[in-house]
Image: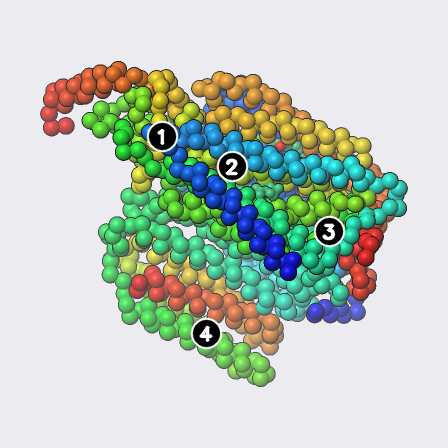
Amino acid sequence: MSSWKEWIFTTDHKRVGILYLIGSMAAFGVAGLMAILMRIELSSIGPTITADPSNYNVWLYFHGAAMILGFQIPALTGFFANYVIPLMIGAKDVAFPRLNALSVWLFYAGIVLALLTFVIPDPPDVMWTAYPPYSTITRGNTAFYTFTVLTLGFASILGGVNFLTTVAYMRAPGVTWNKLNIFVWCTLAAFVLQLIFVPVLGTAVTLITFDKYLGTHFFDPLQGGDVLIYQNLFWFYSHPAVYVIFLPFIGVVYEIVATFSKNPVFNYKMVVYGGVFGIVAISGVVWVHHLYVSGMADWIRIGQMVTTLMISIPVGLMVIGLVGTLYKGAIDFRAPMLWALGVVFLFLIGGLTGIPLAIPSLTLHLSDTYYVVGHFHYVMAVAGTFAIFGGVYYFFPKMTGRMYHEGTARWGFWLTFIGVNIVFWTMMSIGVDGMPRRYYDYAHFPQFLRAHQLMTLGASLIGVGFALAVINWIHGAWKGEKAPDNPWGSRSLEWTTTTPPPPGNWAEVPKVAEDWNPYAYGQRR
Amino acid sequence: MFRHNTVLHALAWWALTGSAALAAYPPTGAVNDPARGWDRLWHEVIVDISVLGVIFAAITAWFVIRYRRRDPAQEGGSFKLTTASAVGWALIPTFVFMADDFYLAAKGWALWNDYRSVPAERLEVQLESGMYSWDYTYPNGVKVQNELKVPAGKPVLLRMTSRDTIHSHFIPDFRVKEDSMPGRVTYLWFYPEKPGEHIVTCAEFCGVMHSYMVGKVIVVAPADFTAWYEQEAARLAKQSAAKPEA
Amino acid sequence: MPHDTPAAPAPHWETSVYPLIITAGLLVFLPLAFVFKFVYHQPFVAVLCLGVGAPVMIYGIAGWVREAIGGEHGEGLAFPAMGWFILAEAMIFVSFFASYWFMRLNAGTWPPVGSVPMPVVLPLVMTAALVLSSITIHLGEAQLERGDQAGFRRWLMLTVMLGLGFLSMSIYEWSHLFHLGFNFETNAYSTIFYTITGFHGSHVLVGLGIFVAILIPALRGRINHHFVRTGALYWHFVDLIWFFVVSQVYFW
Ligand code: HEA
Ligand code: HEA
Ligand code: CUA
Ligand SMILES: [Cu+2]
């Protein structure tokens, strides 16, 4: 077989992972471009680069949907999970390599469907939430959104089945449950969430398409349907989805922080059994916090306020574990560590600004304003993306066998770090002052003009910063210095194989010592 | 033994903070304007989360500066936790966070009750939203579009529904919004204290012209309102007399 | 911890062409065909998509099964994996039932105007057929355990017949209701009725597909025990769900 065939027909988890990385970064690039277009449009009152609000709506739709479903979830549960998990548990591959290849191609099918947005007449313009009745009466082609979600969701479910089985049955001897990397635990939890909740999202979007194109009446109150069914189904998935993003990204950060402070993870069992398990346990009963202003019954809004606030407990434990890992460490500020430390600070801002939103009486003012947009960009778009970028830098030498350029990596980090704070902090502040989201124009809020212009400027900094990172990778993979097998001196299994890992990962199953664990750094006992 | 102490201690704390929050409720006063309650609670919550954030960020920053790697071979030197301290490190934060959560929940709950219990003495207006306008109907049948005129000093209740997609009636100045949608009736109320104008804007994506769906609440002196209201009613009566059997 | 390593052959990159083929088929056969038919009203193009996509996909699946039945790829784990997959499937039904009860409990009267009386006998017969088929596949598995391949094939074929019987009764019932004027568009009850029964029916179809994919090689004496166990597990699940469907949608 020639080598390109070995790539597109591959069933090897490492190559499947890299295919995921390429696809999700492409989604990120295009969705980021949409963000830039939106920012330019918003840089003046009235039409700036398009006179038709539909164009803006299509950009926003694509931006939200592609960033979440096409970039972050696939990058985290597709790329990282695929590349890293089998290596971390000492397996030769995943349990079902062919199924794995099917997942990645379904993911690409979803990306193709999403990108068709830009060529079909009447592209979808329903926002990533696609609430009916708008989504069932728009001229836009909602069916494409449905099928994008269905293919990506199916890919996720197959991935979940695959990885849960892999970790349960294919760990190398000696790699016990309590010696799994935090990243593995986090990702397993994310997959459990995917398995439970993605089908609900799939159902929700399928029902819109039924209503719109087959004449059914799920969301039509005149015939006994109810518009709120959709919102409940949608958020019943899409809230847990934020933890599908959060868990793996914080897992990546844990790996980086432990390695670069040469310290064992602080209170491992608390992190796993309190943090990860706690999040999984609560995540399914808080979705109504997205429906605080939607007209749900009062009692359910109150009840879910308490559960939503309680999410701060397991998440807080995970933050403590992370910060505790730094204590008495030997901290080395390489690029991956910079990005990871950035995550700690930015996630604190993002997570804590979720607290006011959790309180329905405050949300009556805040909901659907730029405050919400600021909250979730900090917690997801910024913390999540920083973790992904840090993670790619971290595993870069293992994946490519070469080193990236350290100086460029740092420059990229600082540019983005400054940019995101300019953009998303401003968003929160104009949100509190009443700027509603999903506005093509803000003619009746002229007081926000300066703020919007500032954000447009900040967004270009972010763009340059991320672009530097991507250029750095492409250049490094091609021309970088040769990397040693274990450049960071990590104790975790994935660094014990040669670089880049051969087919099958190890010549023979790795044997681990009795007292091995992935974080066995110079501990005084 | 250790574990029991922690639990008891935290429970006591939680009970204290919780009851303190409840004791602050209910507030007194003739009309209990939730918009003011909003500003108060907002500040408290901001202080609360800022304190938490600053503590965590400061500790992180301190560790990061304090424990830099000094020579390449250096390894971390953290202690291995004893079982008791490991459990303590899980339980104490849990109860501390939980205490804060319940405290915030109690506060939020109190304000929520203000938002949802409408004073009996009020002006009740029907609202039908549609792409892209706000159509109000007063108790006497007077209809206005996009400009809701209300008397100062009287709470206003909106009963809302929609004839097409979902909209959200957002009055930033009164710190309130609620969706309106076909097939259901939702409500919100606000308290216009002084004469003035307040923007109403649509906060739920409802279609292409979503960002242009704007209106106004015009608060006028009660006497002016009554004059306008009766004049409109009279005009309405004349109109319907002019074309009988509409 | 099960972890068997047969003597490792020289390392090489594993490949399979079928995942890509299946995806390509699926992409053309489902989204594109649907969109051409219902969005752009181009039935001819839609049929073309179906005609191209479906065979490509079936070719892909057949190739996959052929490759996998040898089982060197750890398919012994298929059984627990199917358990996880069933969890996901179950959640789809949960969403349907949740929507159903959400509507029903918020409705003034139920069933809404336009509904017709539901048949009583046929659903009971259908239930009987499905329960029987669960038993027959179980007996088939038992035969296989005992090494009786011919017996297994007989029970498997019987199961497939029962499943087909179920589906034909379902189709009969749908057309009957259609003639009474109770169709997708009648009201919220008809909407949810056809969606749930239709969706369940599609699961029966998939289950039958799995059995056919087991039966064809089995006729030539190639049987993979893990596949059989996995397929049977799925079938039991489809059977179990039917109890929820029949009790809530028809009789409650
Ligand atoms: C990765 C993604 C992610 C994550 C992790 C979170 C985390 C949280 N989110 Fe966020 N959220 C989104 C992504 C995310 N969110 C998105 C995408 C939307 C908008 C969707 C849309 O409408 O388009 C949204 C919207 C959203 C809303 C709805 C707003 C609205 O539309 O009206 C709410 C309301 O409750 C909310 C709350 C929270 C809370 C309480 C958390 C908590 O999990 C945060 C917990 C973390 C901390 C609290 C910080 C660390 C903890 C400590 C330091 C311990 C001490 C703290 C205390 C005791 C308080 N989020
Ligand atoms: C992970 C998710 C994610 C990420 C990373 C981002 C990133 C950004 N987002 Fe967005 N955003 C969302 C998720 C995300 N967003 C969601 C879910 C919504 C809500 C949608 C809805 O309402 O339905 C939203 C909405 C949203 C709005 C609200 C619009 C409105 O309500 O009217 C705005 C406005 O400024 C915005 C801006 C930005 C900006 C400037 C960035 C910047 O950080 C982006 C910077 C990135 C780039 C500029 C790309 C640079 C990359 C390269 C150059 C590499 C190229 C690579 C290759 C070629 C391989 N986003
Ligand atoms: Cu009406 Cu948005
Ligand atoms: Cu949420």
Q: Is residue A296 visible?
A: yes
User: Which residue is the site of mark 2?
Assistant: A356
A464 relative to A62 in the view: left or right: right
Asked which secondary structure carries label 4, the reply is helix
Image mark 2: chain: A
**Residue C172, percent across and down?**
32, 64
A263 relative to A30 in the view: left or right: right
Quarter holding residue C4: bottom right
Question: Is there a contact, CB below 8 Å, between mark 1 and mark 4?
Answer: no
Image mark 1: chain: B
Q: Residue at x 68, y 28 (%)?
A: A418
User: Which residue is the site of mark 4?
Assistant: C134
**Disc 4 residue type (three-letter):** Ser
Which label sits on residue A265?
Answer: 3
Image mark 4: chain: C
Q: Nearer the viewer, mark 4 or mark 3?
A: 3
**Disc 3 residue type (three-letter):** Val
Q: Quadrant of the N terminus of chain C?
A: bottom right
**On the same chain: label 1 and label 4?**
no
Image mark 3: chain: A
Asked which secondary structure carries label 3, the reply is loop
**Disc 1 residue type (three-letter):** Gly
**Residue A345, percent across and down?**
67, 37
- Disc 2 from disc 3: Cα separation: 31 Å
**Disc 2 residue type (three-letter):** Pro
Question: Is there a contact, CB below 8 Å, between mark 1 and mark 2?
Answer: no
**On the same chain: label 2 and label 4?**
no
